[in-house]
Amino acid sequence: MIELPYYMTPLVGALAWSILAGPKNGFFNQLWRLVGGNGDLLNSNTAFGIAWVMAFFEGTVAFMIISPAMKSMDPALEEAPASSGGAS
């Protein structure tokens, strides 16, 4: 599931979050009002909402690119600061 956004366009993620966290008719906001909440729980149309959706969606792409490099890194690079008195 973590690889799924890597193969999709960001438009699909934006549309999905618009359906889930739209200010008026978003699924999460409708559930929030159903349990007695006031106002909007989430709003994907604000600047913070757009940044959060893009970070959530594109974060998996960065993870897929960076993770092979981290796995092939020499473990001695992690042990070197501790052996010279650094924080572990």
Image (cartoon, grey):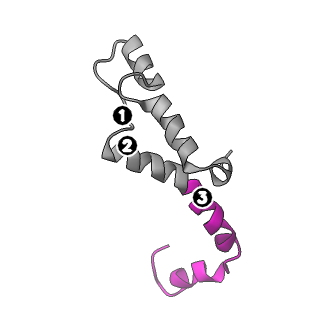
Does the magenta run of residues contain 83? yes
* Residue beneath disc 2: 49
Tell me if 5 is positioned left or right of 88 in this view.
right
The residue range painted magenta reads 59-88
Q: Residue at x 50, y 42 (%)?
A: 14
Residue 51 placement (x, y as % from top left): 39, 50
* Residue beneath disc 3: 61
Q: CA distance from mark 2 to mark 1?
A: 6 Å
> From the viewer's perspective, is residue 44 above or below residue 52?
above
Of residues 86 and 26, the one drawn nearer to the viewer in this rendering: 26
**Sequence-first tag of 2 and 1:** 1
Q: Residue at x 40, y 23 (%)?
A: 29
Callout 2 amino acid:
Gly
Q: CA distance from mark 3 to mark 2?
A: 19 Å
Q: Residue at x 69, y 69 (%)?
A: 68
Quarter of the picture holding the N terminus: top right
Look at the numbered disc 3 and give the secondary structure of its residue: helix
Tell me if 51 is positioned left or right of 8 in this view.
left
* Residue beneath disc 1: 43
Q: Residue at x 60, y 50 (%)?
A: 9
Q: Residues within 10 Å of mark 1 (few under 14, many from 20)?
A: many
> From the viewer's perspective, is residue 59 above or below residue 53?
below
**Sequence-first tag of 1 and 3:** 1
> From the viewer's perspective, is residue 54 above or below residue 37?
below
Residue 60 placement (x, y as % from top left): 59, 54
Callout 1 amino acid:
Asn
Badge 2 vs badge 1, beta-carbon distance below 8 Å: yes
Look at the numbered disc 2 and give the secondary structure of its residue: helix
Q: Residues within 10 Å of mark 2 (few under 14, many from 20)?
A: some
The image quadrant of residue 13 is top right
Residue 59 placement (x, y as % from top left): 53, 56
Of residues 34 and 13, the one drawn nearer to the viewer in this rendering: 13
